Image (cartoon, helix red, strand yellow):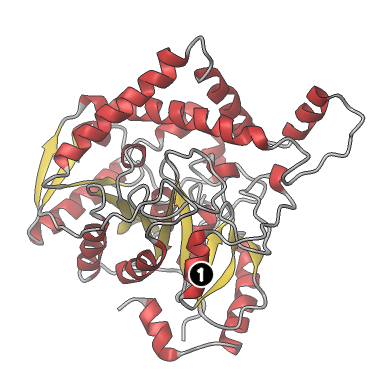
Amino acid sequence: MGVISEFRKMGKNGSYHQTLIKDLKRINEKLQFLGALNESLTEGIPFTVKDNICVKGFEARAGSKILGGYVPPFNATAVERMLAKGFGFLGKTQMDEFGFGSFGINTQVQARNPFNPDKVAGGSSSGAAVATAVMKYHVAIAESTGGSISNPAAFCGVLGFTPTYGTVSRYGLIDYANSLDKIGIMGRSGDDIREVFDIIKGADRYDSTCVDTKVKGEGKKKLVVINQLMKGIDEEILSSFDSLLSQLGEMGYKVEHVSIDSITKAIPAYYIISMAEASTNLAKYTGYKYGLQRESFTEKYNAFFTGARAAFGTEAKRRIVLGTFVRSESVKDKYYTKALQFRTAITNKLGQILKDAFIISPTMPITAPDFEQAAKLTPLQTYAMDSLTIPPNLSGLPHISFPCDYKRRMPVGAQLITGHFNDYALLDFVSEWEKRFEYRFKYSLGAI
């Protein structure tokens, strides 16, 4: 039984929520994972929302200075559906600016890992993962573009579920890359994620990309490991992964290793497509309509526009420049069109495997690094950290990261991928895994 069902049976409200908020204020001073708290909350199962998802009356900055002061007058569809089912909005969680990052450090306020505050929480849904790791009766609404749910879930030792693209409405999401963004869920058990997924999925008239296709749960007993994805992984992670495969073998799963040469093109294809879409989406932030307001109205347009966009962080500027370049007329076919072709090829290849198997891998090639270590990585080294999470995100495939081991008191995550609209099979799998493996949490705020 998940914590949601347990909380409902207890029927806690009023003073419970106020005590929880008081405790959160204290721990947030140390871990910095919450950007805003709903201090008036008195009822409902607490849930948090990533800062790039709109909640009426609460600032939505998407981790960026340029959106400072933007307060949405409406709720995102996923938020509206949660509230309608009796969940209580608790607060907004920190993130990398517009989702640009793997470590949660590309933002003004950096969330810290609950297992060790000297280490990063992962990105871009850093705050959502920390919130899930520190509160017992809670679920987080997060978002993934190239691994922004799986990555921090692995680093913080929680479940991170990214559904099939199009199953959950993106209405009310501040976009990074429209064809890649997916609203998902972080929780402490498969049962909790299942209940929230049931609530937020389904067609929405406000989002033309959202569909009402029936979601299945067809289990598989074959697990495929893609050889090319296993290169460059830390030895500790490989040791944990081998142990996981052995345990799954005892549970009746058959492991098969395959080679897919084209999978190595997933990272460049993803970054070309995502940067191209990001540069288009960020063009609207000009300093006079959304968020940050400039009042130098005597300036000429170019000077005004340049001054406003100086508020973007370094990584955002890098992606704007590169994205604008790859979709320019002179090189569009060379880079952007070719990336779309590789995306189709990779999606088709993975789809063939997933007809009768799951694909399994570690979630991240390392455990959570120190802030200093993460800051020293070059952009290319940072992008390479997403080698395991990008393929399913690029293809819009449902996937879940789940804790499978602990090394030097830090969690290790594994990632399971299934075919489009077979999302429930992932939740069935982790529910089965949870009968064998006990997750560890350093904090359990709100526990009774």
Find residue 226 and report its image quarter: top left
Report the residue that reaches farthest toward the top.
330
Q: Nearer the viewer, residue 167 or 59?
A: 167
| On screen, residue 439 above or below 232 | below
Q: Secondary structure at mark 1?
A: strand
| On screen, residue 108 above or below 158 | above
- Few, some or many residues within 10 Å of mark 1 (<14, 14–19, 20+): many
Q: Nearer the viewer, residue 388 or 442?
A: 388
Residue 405, visible in the rendered structure:
no
Residue found 36% across the figure and 47% down from its top: 165
Q: Residue 176: image x %, image y %? A: 53, 40
Q: Nearer the viewer, residue 25 or 4?
A: 4
Does residue 22 appear left or right of residue 100 in this picture? right
Residue found 43% across the figure and 21% down from its top: 336
Q: State the quadrant of the N terminus.
A: bottom left
| On screen, residue 74 above or below 394 | below
Q: Residue 344: image x %, image y %? A: 29, 29
Residue 51, visible in the rendered structure:
yes
Residue found 61% across the figure and 34% down from its top: 316
Does residue 107 appear left or right of residue 233 in this picture? right
Residue found 50% across the figure and 88% down from its top: 12
| Residue type (three-letter) at the residue carrying disc 1 | Phe
Residue linked to disc 1: 47
Q: Nearer the viewer, residue 296 or 116?
A: 296
Q: Residue 417: image x %, image y %? A: 25, 48
Q: Residue 173: image x %, image y %? A: 54, 51
Report the residue that reaches farthest toward the right.
298
